[in-house]
Image (tube, helix red, strand yellow):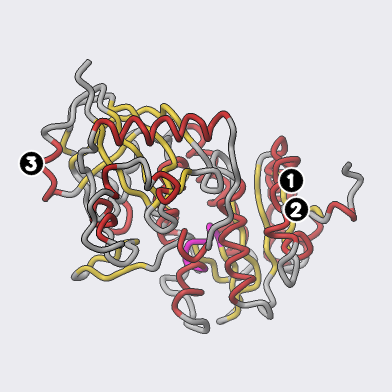
Amino acid sequence: MNRKYWLDLFTGITWEEFLEHGANVSGFRERRKNIVKNIHPGDYFICYLTGISRFIAVLEVQSECYFDESVIFKNETFPHRFKVKLVHRLEPKTAVPVSILKDKLSLFENLKSPSVWSGFFRGSPVEFNIDDAKIIIEAIKQAETNPIEREFDPRKYYSQPKQYGSTKKIVPEKQEPEIKSIPEKPLASTRIHDEIQYLLLKLGSDMNLDVWVAKNDRNREFNGISFQTIPRLKRELPRQFDNLTNKIIEMIDVLWLRGDAIVAAFEVEHSTSIYSGLLRMSDLVSMQPNINLNLYLVAPDERRGKVLEEINRPTFAKLNPSLPRICRFIPYSRLKNEIEQLGSKVKYMRLDFIDELAENCQLDKLNVP
């Protein structure tokens, strides 16, 4: 097979969204239409996280390019799309930094200045030199077999949005990652995530609280009910923090508010890495250590062990305040059962009843080895 290898850019946010929505569709801008004609089934996309400059995955192209203007993230259409399949996948912490390959890749040869190499990563798709591609893929395969965890700056992982005309898009400075599209038919995992998100939004609204859904989830629905029709859904958040903090808060799955005060924040972690929701929460705590906010991770019952394992990593446990101390776990079954039992009584419930459903995440407070 005369396979070609192409760069596919992601930010931390778009990578998480890509995984959450099935990891089977990648799309590119209208102005890339002449380039995408050269991409065919069997070619590989090498996925690169722009904010932290790491290679995270390899995708195999499963279809010819097709034109589709259906639902897209961030109010911008990326109509030139491909069906794809994950071939190799790492986590952000075990992803391969481009810097450790600089002595092997032709991208770093004969540079006029030390930063010129980054020009290759300013847009996608771009075709790789075959030798470079094989070196990168081999490094990704080795990282799958023998993962090495490397810390990174969460602020770079969740890169600052940048304005392009009237369209907002997650773009690190001087780079242009392509935002990924939603598959045409939602997967079961996506539907369950939407269900839990909807239940939390409706629960907060029924308790006479204002509610907020993550900015990129505003157009979602559950059982034919659009999130946008939920009473007390806020269109804008109060601007009580700096811009970077606000951008992190806007991406949290569900918020409950009383007036201008955010009183509870929920991250629903169904099919994505538990680590992604924790990063948003840890960023929030790092930037606003005095924030008085109840944090909750909502996940399937069987992921309880994974939640406890991840939240008690030193990265989160050594925060001040410690994330395991201020963030609690709510299993799906307990949330659903409580909502069913409450019925019409929900409007009389006090906010602190949610803590009765939630579990402490501090290992020293639990009977956990």
Is residue 368 placed above or below 325 in the rendered structure? above
Expressed as whole percent of the image width and height from the top left, the position of residue 73 reads 32, 53
Expressed as whole percent of the image width and height from the top left, the position of residue 166 reads 21, 70
Q: Secondary structure at mark 2?
A: loop
The alpha-carbon separation of the residues under discs 2 and 3 comes to 48 Å
**Along the horizontal axis of the image, is 314 left or right of 155?**
right
Depth check, front residue: 274 or 111: 111
The residue that disc 2 covers is 312
For residue 60, the mark is none
For residue 34, the mark is 3
Q: How many marks?
A: 3
Depth check, front residue: 366 or 87: 87
Is residue 25 placed above or below 170 in the rendered structure? above
Displayed quadrant of residue 69 = top left
Density class for disc 2 (Cα within 10 Å; few <14, some 14-19, many ≥20) is: some
Density class for disc 1 (Cα within 10 Å; few <14, some 14-19, many ≥20) is: few
The residue that disc 1 covers is 309
Residue found at x 55% / y 38% = 271
Asked if labels 3 and 1 touch by Cβ distance under 8 angstroms, the answer is no
Q: Is residue 221 visible?
A: no
- Give the residues in magenta: 249-254
Expressed as whole percent of the image width and height from the top left, the position of residue 329 reads 73, 52
